[in-house]
Amino acid sequence: MKALIKLVFFVTASVVLLQVAECKSVVQNAKDALSHAVESVGLTHGRKPAPEREMKAIEKSEKFVKNRIDRYMDMSIAEEKKALKKINHAKKKTGPRRHWIFYSDFLESNVNVLRFDVRLSICEQQKHFTKFIDDVPSANPELAKFMKSEEYQRKIKINPPTLDPAIIVALKRDTDGKRQITADLTNQPDSLADLKRYFAKRVHEVTHMHNTKFDSFETAAVRVYDALRNAVIVWSDLKQDLKAGRKIPESMEAKATEVQIALGAGKDLGCYDKDPHDP
């Protein structure tokens, strides 16, 4: 039992060190890529209307996020094959368990890093969107006037429009922080052959669990980017439907809600302590 505790401690410490290094790299890479995306939009499409440039910037940021998620999915597939191979070639009974623990911690680390990466990218784009709202007057003056009215400001202070809670949960760090190793290590078989089959199955299970999380990141990210697009459409009075096949709302308050959801997305996702547009 002491040996197992030492093993888990060693593996966890190793993964944490890797995660810290990856986080530093992720932050810089995300900022560099997004800055380049925004700059390229401005340089390449400098003569296009501001709403079109903003939509293009959102598209580039979304593409960057999807590529990051795909990269981590591919990485998981490759590491799963390695883990299964190591388990299959284990010579001692402790081998299958050790390889599974390391693989599980590797995936858990990747989930945390990717969640941080995706949220950082969204936050950078949301801040860019906020600047767009500040710098570009609404094509619908009545909408801007309505949103600045004391009555509307009081209303959103009491009950602010927010992103779907499912989006917030998916993109913010797990609150429990609990690992599943203890539960998965109960009722193990005795023979080496059975242990190999047992932990190979555990590998497939943990892979599926973490891939589901990767998918949830992409789904949530797309919905946030769609919220930003919808706000640009409404604010700029573009003659096109909203995302997900929705029509532009008719009432002024419903239009304001579309814009306010996007303005408050940064606060919802913890991008900064206080939303600059928070009343």
Image (spheres, grey):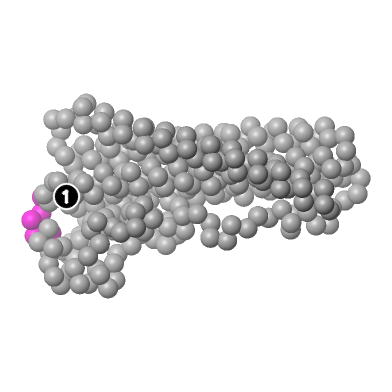
Q: Residue furthest right?
A: 191
Residue 142 counted in the magenta span: yes
Please name the residue that numbered disc 1 is placed on. 134
Give the residue at x 18% y 42%: 51
Work out whether residue 274 or residue 203 is closer to the camera in this orientation and state it: 274
Instruction: Give how far across and how far down residue 44 sits, in percent.
Output: 21, 26
Q: Around disc 1, counting alpha carbons within 10 Å, would you say few (fewer than 14), some (14 to 19), or many (20 or more)?
A: few
Residue appearing at x 25%, y 31% in the figure? 39
Look at 29% across and 64% down and name the residue there: 161
- Residue 229 visible in image: no
Q: Main secondary structure of the magenta part?
A: helix
Q: Which segment did they paint magenta?
A: 139-143
In the depicted view, which residue is nearer to us: 159 or 56?
159
Going by the image, does 267 lie left or right of 8?
Answer: left
Quarter of the rendering containing residue 92: top right
| Residue 107: percent from left, percent from top | 62, 43
Q: At which x and y percent is residue 188?
A: 84, 53
Residue 263 among those drawn in magenta = no
Asked if residue 262 can be seen in this view, the reply is yes
Above/below status of 196 relative to 163: above
| Residue ranking furthest to the top | 44
Against 163, residue 72 (above or below) is: above
Q: Quadrant of the C terminus?
A: bottom left
Residue 119 x/y as whole percent? 42, 47
Left/right of residue 226 with respect to residue 149 in the rendered view: right
User: How many marks are shown on the rendered structure?
Assistant: 1
Report the amino acid beneath label 1: Asp
Secondary structure of the residue carrying tag 1 is: helix
Which residue is at 91% across, 45% downward?
Answer: 191
